[in-house]
Each structure stands twice: as C-alpha cells, then as structure tokens.
Amino acid sequence: KNEVEQSPQNLTAQEGEFITINCSYSVGISALHWLQQHPGGGIVSLFMLSSGKKKHGRLIATINIQEKHSSLHITASHPRDSAVYICAVRHYGGATNKLIFGTGTLLAVQP
Amino acid sequence: NAGVMQNPRHLVRRRGQEARLRCSPMKGHSHVYWYRQLPEEGLKFMVYLQKENIIDESGMPKERFSAEFPKEGPSILRIQQVVRGDSAAYFCASSPRDGGFIIQYFGAGTRLSVL
C-alpha cells in the first residue's frame, strides 16, 4: 500500500463545476504539498500546509491532521484547470526534506 | 518556478550510452533534489544534495546512477549504460534550505527516451 493515496485517479468535469480531489496518507508528516503538472510540462507548487485551510484564487486546500487527510477544491472550474494534481508529504522527523508523492489525479475540465 | 533550469528538456539515447541531465537551482538555493517519474507512475525521490555533498541518496538505483552538485555549476544526474527502463521524466527541485516547512521549486524536467 502506498504511503500517500489519492482519489479519484481520473476526474472529468464540466466547466463551472466544483471539484474535490482527496489525499490520504499513512505516515506522520510535517507538511503536505499540492502540486500541479500540465501534460508534458513542469511541476508547479500550489500549496504547502500543515494545518487548517489555505485559499488562493479559486483553489482551496484543507488538511485534517488527526484523520491524515487533505482535500484540494477548485471552484468554478475552467478548461485551463485541466492537469494532473499531485499530493506529496514530508515525513515528520524525516532526516531530509524529500517528498513522498501520490500517483496523481488527472483532471479534465470540458467546456 | 521558471527559476529552476533543467536541460536538456528532451534527451534521446541508445541503449548503452550515457545520459547527463543538468539542473541549475534558483538563485540563492543551495539544496537540490532529483525525482524520477516513470511512465504511468508517480514521482519518486532519488537523491538530495547540497553544494559538494550528497546528503541522501536512498532513492538512487545502486548501479549506473550518480549525482553531483559541485561548488560551481549545475547539479548533474548521470546515468551510465542506459537501458530502456531508464526512460522517464527526471525532475529537479531546489530550496534555499532544508526543513519541514520549506517549499521546493521544480524545474520543467528532462524527458529521457532510451531507444
């Protein structure tokens, strides 16, 4: 079993829909990251959080440390949001800042 | 994120050749991480380096792979005698320091294809 699990693996939405991507992890963490990767493209860091909730534009990330769960929400989705969204965690007390990644959620937003 | 520069963006090698992947971290960053993304798989940590030191290479294959981050110049990930299974996207990330709540900035990646 992977230490970081994401769901769903694939998601298709209509433009304007509210989208939720989930991430569960099985290890103690010091930080959780949400990343975005466009097909054939680089990786962009969207959020880094260790508690509570963060908002940036139409994106919202939440984390529940007790339940070891995080969600990424996209409000008023747009075709340009189509990408792979990746959850990554850093082990609490880990010797280094290396990240452990989920397998990603492929989001397609149709016009 | 454009600050982390990786080159080449695409690299084609025949089996048995050597591949050299370069990563220039963001200005002021002295910590570099290499990750590999195999087809249809998630990203996996390979190695973490600071200037002139390998700090954590627990994700590096035991043979054919090496990494360095010299005092001057970019970090280099070197793959000797490449095989088809080395075909993947290799991403470099950098940060100004290590720590639990430090953002890593990623490069655009190098896509290696082994024929």
Image: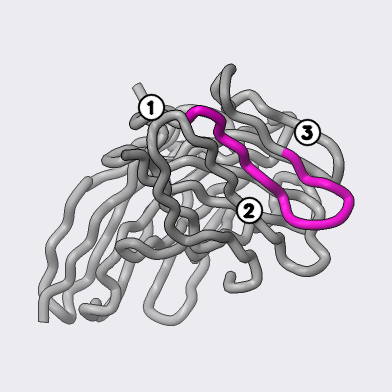
The structure residue drawn at horizontal position 54% and vertical position 57%, both measured from the top left corner, is: A52
Name the amino acid, label 2.
Arg
What's drawn in magenta, residue-wise? B68-81
Of circles 2 and 1, the one toward us is 2
The answer to which quarter of the image holds residue A14 is bottom left
Could you say which quadrant of the image residue B5 lies in?
bottom right
- Residue B19 lies left or right of residue B33; in this view the side is left
- Callout 3: 10 Å neighbours few (<14), some, many (20+)? some
The chain that hosts pointer 1 is A
Check disc 1: other Cα within 10 Å, few if <14, some if 14-19, many if 20+. few
**A5 relative to A109 in the view: left or right:** right
Nearer to me, A3 or B107 = B107
Whole-number angstrom distance, CA of label 2 to CA of label 1:
30 Å
From the image, tell me which residue sits under label 1: A2
The quarter of the picture where residue A71 lies is bottom left
Q: Residues within 10 Å of mark 2 (few under 14, many from 20)?
A: many
Q: Which mark is residue B54?
A: 3
Residue on which the image places disc 2 = B22
